Image (cartoon, grey):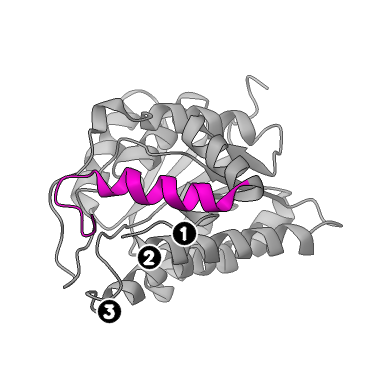
Amino acid sequence: MNNYFENKVAIVTGSSSGIGLATARLLAERGAKVVLAARNIEKLDEIEKELKEKGADVFAIKTDVSSEQDCRDLIEETVNHFNTIDILINNAGISMRALFKDIDLKVIRTLMEVNFFGTVYCTKYALPYLMKAKGSVIGVSSVAGFHGMPGRIGYSASKHAMHGFMSSLRIENRKTDLHVMLVIPGFTASNIRRSALVADGSIQGESPRKEGKMMMPEEVANAIIKGIPKRKKKVLLSIEGKGSSFLTKWCPSYLDWLFYHHLAKEPNSPFE
């Protein structure tokens, strides 16, 4: 397993920060050819330079995953540059914080375009190459994907949709060699809360949570890297993630209460 990633071509969306960046770095360290994809090309160029100085084979492509054309271009440019795709990590995501009664519907549409359709677009265009390579497609999700999360209704809906998409894709490919894996971390310290949208669509700007007490992106990235060679179907992380999964199945009403009261304690919570 130590040389599993050597010379494999891996695309990581949302790789300018957080889980995506941590995963891209680990892949590069293990000898993979890494395609960095995100909207912030200046940041990607810095990361590309950093990794190349360490001897990695890295290629940065400016990509807005909410654009079908950008996703098509990402796949085509990757294949033109590296000839194949072995691993697609759908990590790009955006969050929100507002009550449904207050929210502008464009916010929910944005969440669905990035979190759900971004995964669909990239996977659709990468699929022929992944199937030929007997490769892996990964979706980085959240505990909000299997149980509703108050104040994050668009985020939760988009992650539920991702879960359904990835599960269906896996079942469709029972008789092929395509590996489909869903990664479900608990609360993770990253830029996603600072860039979260509020009711009118503007950016929150500051995290309402204590980021230092959360799981670190490197922990999630390490779990992804371990899960791919083992061709796992699901990687469930943290006490929050495992506990939420258990309670969703056996005591969903208690989990409703727990989520409500836990998130109501956040500074400036939209509900009390």
Between disc 2 and disc 3, the foreground one is 2
Farthest top residue in view: 2
Q: Is 263 covered by the magenta stretch?
A: yes
Across and down, in percent, residue 180 comes to 67, 51
Residue type (three-letter) at the residue carrying disc 2? Ile
Considering depth in this image, is 150 or 208 the residue closer to the camera? Answer: 150
Apparent side of residue 188 relative to residue 169 in the rendered image (left or right): left
Question: What distance separates the C-alpha of mark 3 from that of mark 1?
Answer: 20 Å
Question: What distance separates the C-alpha of mark 2 from that of mark 3?
Answer: 13 Å
Across and down, in percent, residue 23 comes to 44, 35
Q: What crowding class fits label 3: few (fewer than 14 Cα within 10 Å), some (14-19), or many (20 or more)?
A: few
Which residue is under mark 1? 148
Q: Is 38 covered by the magenta stretch?
A: no
Relative to 112, does residue 95 appear above or below in the rendering? above
Relative to 66, does residue 29 appear above or below in the rendering? above
**Which label's residue is closer to the chain start, 2 or 1?**
1
Q: Is disc 2 in contact with disc 3, using a CB cutoff of under 8 Å? A: no
Q: At 63% across and 59% down in the image, what residue appears?
A: 166
Across and down, in percent, residue 86 comes to 62, 47
Q: At 62% across and 41% down in the image, what residue appears?
A: 246
Residue 153 is labelled as 2
Across and down, in percent, residue 165 comes to 61, 65
Q: Secondary structure at mark 3?
A: helix
Look at the image and tell me in which quarter the C terminus lies.
Answer: bottom left
Look at the image and tell me in which quarter the N terminus lies.
Answer: top right
Considering depth in this image, is 72 or 103 the residue closer to the camera? Answer: 103
Query: What's drawn in magenta, residue-wise?
Result: 251-272
Which residue is under mark 3? 106
Residue type (three-letter) at the residue carrying disc 3? Lys
Between disc 3 and disc 1, the foreground one is 1
Q: What crowding class fits label 1: few (fewer than 14 Cα within 10 Å), some (14-19), or many (20 or more)?
A: many
Instruction: Look at the image and tell me whether residue 27 can be seen.
Output: no
